Image: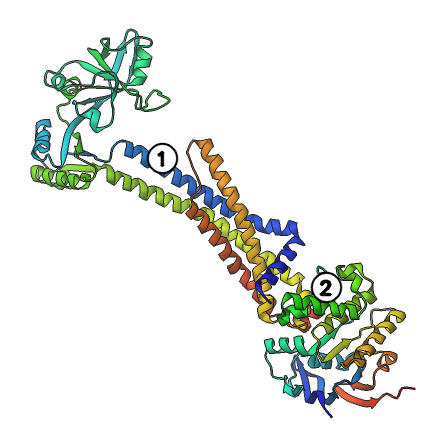
Amino acid sequence: MNALIRLENIYKIYKIGDNEVRALDGVSLSIAQNEFVSIVGPSGSGKSTLMNVIGCLDTPTSGEYYIEGTEVSKMRDDRLADIRNTKIGFIFQSYNLLGKLTVIENVELPLIYMGKPRSERHALARAAIERVGLADRENNRPNQLSGGQQQRVAIARALANRPPLILADEPTGALDSRTGAEIMQMLKDIHQSGNTIILITHEKEVAEHAQRIISIHDGKISSDSEVTHA
Amino acid sequence: MNISQALKMAFQSIAGNKMRAFLTMLGIIIGVAAVIIMVSLVQASTASITAQMESLGTNMMTVMLTGRNSSRNLSVADMQKLVDDNPNFFNSVAPSVSGSPTIKAGTVNASTSLIGTNQHYSEINNTPVESGRFITEADCTSRKKVVVIGKYIANKYFEGQDPAGQTLKVSGQVFTVVGVLTAKTTTMTEGSTDDRIIIPYTTAQRLLRNAEIRSYSFQATSSEVAEQASEKLEELLLKLLGSENAYRVMNQAEMLENVATMTGTMSMMLGGIAGISLIVGGIGIMNIMLVSVTERTREIGIRKAIGARRKSIMSQFLIESIVVSCIGGIIGIIIGIAGTYFIGKAVGIEAGASAMVMLLSAGVSVSIGIFFGWYPANKASKLNPIDALRFE
């Protein structure tokens, strides 16, 4: 199996006073290219910490983490920033768009940090916006869009750099069920076109859109199973 | 991320909060304008003082005989001999005796200042006559009771008539007016340099019952040799009097230097005081940038999550503070130029802001942007993306 990401014995330990909190307690897992995986667990289970580690927003206390065979668990800040920029697209529950920028400027941001020249940036950003069906809104600001539209802008931003891995943290959490379903369909389409998607959620129905569900409890993987679609 | 992107971001952020940006700039604006106005006005007044002094002639030097540590006193003839013996250095010498007698013409009387001197005084001290004649050698040798009057006195005592040939009582003695001095001031008020009379020094010695002449003005042959002439004069006087304490020589060049040093110090001091307001302005920028970093913590988190390096965040905030302080600096320079012009006009000095001061304050405002922007920018760049994303 060609693993896109591989975690080996990942620990994340916080010290609060004399107490030791094991947010991640020896997690090992491997996700292949073009998998669609859900990570589920109640709050406090460590799934957010796991997402932060997978997203290179945080480094583990110990253990090894590889993306496309490169160890990233011991990288420094700026290298991690580059990995986030080129390998990972983030989709957040609260969209996290920059309110003062227009849709296209938001989508261009990762391309700016990648160092793409202006014309290429425009082309790539426009392609991503078209893909989420917002071509006519590219000069609007986020507050002029509905929640579902804002989340689609965030998806376009995640796709703009063409990263292999899309990390979606409760992407439907702030949306009504109909819009949520649209967003899920969009993620599925993205998966169909070749991306690997990791979806973090606490809703079982949302998780079942994936091919594989990993459950986290008390910092440990409690189950890891394929979903059989009826 | 390149500079043009960073600049665009900075302008976007400033445009998004115009009032705050303006208030932030205000410190820099006031500081830069104050430095320019203060320094330019001092420079302009220095220039006008220097010009006035130069109009007196840089080849003039004065000797004061203090009489200390020396039993010998020098006479006018001794001084004249110094001039005659050193024609390469000196043109002429004029003694000067001063007093403040009461003068009376008709029924009007007042006190004025008097100078007793010889025929060379007019040229050495640049005091030409407007009408009539100056004191002559003959007046001095025969102690004639003739008087040259200042323009103020001419206007006050002999209004509407030709003063020449009229009589004027000086300390109760009758003098004949022979000439009127050209006005030195435009206002010609009482107590000004136009309120004075000049008589032969021999007559003055007798009138004031003061036998000794302690002050002389020498004229060097040219301003090029003025420095050497003054050294030569010191050397000769030392030989004659035997003590350095017995005399003092002051030349115009030295006086000019003194003025330059004095106004230079003043310029530094005023500039320094104004400079403090620049520092205060800089602290204002730092303050606002720190607030801005806190306010935009989430934005920083988002930027970091999608791949901004430390350097990108750092330069974004740094460039923002540089842009703010530069705009402030430019506005300050404009206000400084205008302020210098108008205040200069109001106080009657022809003043223009010098390019040097403008360049300096422009440089200072950029440095302030960098210096005071550094800490907040660095703080922003070091934010942890997870904490920043969680920030509400």
Residue carrying label 2: A104
Determine whether the residue tagged by mark 2 lies in a helix, strand or loop: helix
Tell which subunit mark 2 falls on: A
Left/right placement of residue B85 relative to residue B7 reads left
Question: Which residue type does callout 2 highlight?
Answer: Ile
Q: Residue furthest bottom?
A: A1
Residue B116 sits in which quadrant? Answer: top left
Amino acid found under the numbered disc labelled 1: Ser
Neighbor class of circle 1 (other Cα within 10 Å; few <14, some 14-19, many 20+) is some
Image mark for residue B48: 1
Residue B58 percent across, percent down from the top left: 24, 36
Q: Residue furthest top?
A: B106
Vertical side of A12 occupied by B135: above or below: above
Residue A219 visible in the displayed image: yes
- Please tell me which residue lies in front, B110 or B125: B125
Q: Where is residue B365? Give x, y as percent.
A: 50, 53
Residue B231: x and y, percent? 15, 41
Instruction: Name the quadrant containing residue B153.
Output: top left
In which quadrant will I find the C terminus of chain B? Answer: bottom right
Q: Residue at x 22, y 9 (%)?
A: B165
Label 1 chain ID: B
Q: In which quadrant will I find the N terminus of chain B? A: bottom right
